[in-house]
């Protein structure tokens, strides 16, 4: 198999999607490896999961820094680590336009709704209030507009009577953990075959 692509993952919290990407990368036929996990919160629980697997981590609080200056620090770490792609996985900070432009077509995000519905926050509450039949998750290419880039994959999760934002979030997360590794792998394989 060709050398694996190096993926860096940005997280802000639990890191369960990062963990799904990481453990999926242990399969022999996975086209990527996780080269670095970064966080804007040094207390993010996901950092411990990465460390346990021997993955290099970098964490620093963004507090008190200009967005573009903080993102430049992240970019420096990505370059040092030789990252080919960036996967946002519960990274709860908007990125500066410079950073997004630099990583254009090399950065994906996971969002907990069936885009284009419910960009931004509070997606489960909004789906419940709208009386939707389905919630779900989407993987999209990151572009300048928040949660706006081309959607590469989605999983629908049925809403049942009595669902709350929390109960829905739990089921959507199971779906996310399946969808993200699969979609990232397929996208990397496609990007690489285009570049050949
Ligand atoms: C995930 O459900 C992801 O879809 C969501 O944050 C959660 C992070 O969980 N992302 C967003 O809301 C982005 N706007 P995790 O840290 O356990 O992966």
Image (tube, rainbow, N blue to C red):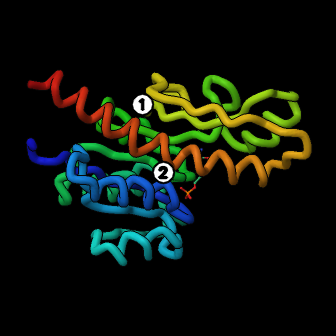
- As rendered, which of 8 and 128 lies closer to the eye? 128
- Which residue extends farthest front? 28
Say which quarter of the image contains residue 135: top right
User: Which secondary structure, mark 1?
Assistant: strand
Residue at the image position 36 percent from the left and 77 percent from the top = 52
Residue at 35% of width from left, 69% of height from top?
58
Quadrant holding the C terminus: top left
**Residue 104 drawn at (x, y percent):** 32, 31
Give residue 49's quadrant in the image.
bottom left
In the displayed structure, 193 sits above or below 33; it is: above
Q: Earlier in the sequence, mark 2 or mark 1?
A: 2
Q: Nearer the viewer, residue 102 or 110?
A: 110
Asked whether the viewer can see residue 77, the reply is no
Q: Is mark 2 within 8 Å of ligand 1?
A: yes
* Residue 90 visible to the viewer: yes
Percent x, y for residue 40?
48, 63
In the image, taking residue 125 as reference, residue 78 lies left or right, namely: left
Is residue 96 placed above or below 189 in the rendered structure? below
Q: In the drawing, what numbered circle is on residue 106?
A: none
Q: Quadrant of the N terminus?
A: top left
Q: Residue at x 25, y 47 (%)?
A: 30
As displayed, is residue 1 above or below residue 13? above
Residue 189 located left or right of residue 156:
left
Mark 2 surroundings within 10 Å by alpha-carbon count, few (fewer than 14), some (14 through 19), many (20 or more): many
Which residue is located at x 27 percent, y 54 percent? 27
Q: What kind of element bears circle 2? A: loop
Separation of residues labelled 2 and 1 (CA atoms):
13 Å
In this orientation, which residue lies closer to the viewer: 175 or 103?
A: 175
Q: Which residue is mark 1?
A: 141
Q: Which residue is mark 2?
A: 89
């Amino acid at each position: 198999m060709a050398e694996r692509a190096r993926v860096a993952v940005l997280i802000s919290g639990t890191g369960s999607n990062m963990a799904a990407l990481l453990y999926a990368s242990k399969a022999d036929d996975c086209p990527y490896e996780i080269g670095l996990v970064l966080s804007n919160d040094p207390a993010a629980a996901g950092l411990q999961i990465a460390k346990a697997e021997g993955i290099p981590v970098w964490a620093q609080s963004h507090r008190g820094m200009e967005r573009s200056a903080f993102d430049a620090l992240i970019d420096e770490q990505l370059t040092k680590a030789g990252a080919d792609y960036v996967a946002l996985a519960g990274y709860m900070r908007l990125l500066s336009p410079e950073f997004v432009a630099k990583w254009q077509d090399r950065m994906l995000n996971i969002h907990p709704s069936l885009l284009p519905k419910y960009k931004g926050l509070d997606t489960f509450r909004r789906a419940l209030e709208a009386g939707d039949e389905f919630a779900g998750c989407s993987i999209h290419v990151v572009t300048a507009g928040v949660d706006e880039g081309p959607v590469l994959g989605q999983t629908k999760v049925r809403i049942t009577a009595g669902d709350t934002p929390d109960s829905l979030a739990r089921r959507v997360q199971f779906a996310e953990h399946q969808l993200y590794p699969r979609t990232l792998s397929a996208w990397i394989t496609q990007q690489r075959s285009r570049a050949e």
